[in-house]
Image (spheres, rainbow, N blue to C red):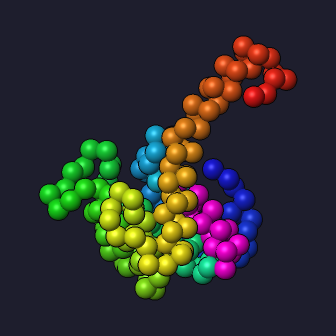
Amino acid sequence: MTEKWREDEEYMSYVQDLLETEAVKKLANYTQHVHSTRLEHSISVSYYSYLLAKKWGGNAKATARAGLLHDLFYYDWRTTKFDEGTHAYIHPRIAVKNAEKITDLSDLERDIILKHMWGATIAPPKYKEGYIVTFVDKYCAVKEAAQPMSASMRKRWQRYFGKESSI
């Protein structure tokens, strides 16, 4: 996970209040994608989505805030089951309810959080910012799960072919 977000004054002005809440801090206690906490994952999704929203003329503030709150739930998604539907369907609704306890959500932020599982659910995002968070979420999940494997593969490559070799 990049640490550049800490020095990005504009980004921090958008999310600092959320990062200071116990509701968000508590995400550090939950594993998300094998090698990351839910807080680390949420910050990564938030920051990379914010950068893309800025680049593509989107609402960077709403994107940063919704990206940070998109997985605001407190259970192990691998073992917890629901009668009302799958984790992909349920957890965005739980995240919205939890987010509404700590901040007022705009319609844009609410839609981003609710629709970020599009692909695993059928309702597509209504706004481009929702597509940004949806795709960045998938990118970060793969990166977080695969990163240790990548380091292992790199070491193996270097052992077989030498440190100066590249693919």
At x 44% / y 48%, what residue is drawn?
32
Above/below status of 151 relative to 71: above
Quadrant of the rendering where the C terminus is positioned: top right
Residue 74: tell me if it is visible.
no
Residue extent of the magenta highlight = 41-57
Q: In terms of depth relative to the viewer, which is nearer, 9 or 44? A: 44
Q: Residue furthest left?
A: 83
Q: Position of residue 133 (x, y in %)?
A: 52, 66
Q: Is residue 63 magenta?
A: no
Q: Is residue 63 left or right of residue 97?
A: right
At x 73% / y 68%, what residue is drawn?
8
Q: Position of residue 98 (x, y in %)?
A: 35, 71
Q: In terms of depth relative to the viewer, which is nearer, 69 or 111? A: 111
Q: Position of residue 145 (x, y in %)?
A: 51, 41
At x 46% / y 54%, what residue is drawn?
38
Count how many numbered circles sit on residues in the image: 0
Picture quadrant where residue 114 is located: bottom left
Q: Position of residue 63 (x, y in %)?
A: 56, 74
Residue 122: tell me if it is visible.
yes
Q: Is residue 49 magenta?
A: yes
Picture quadrant where residue 64 is located: bottom right
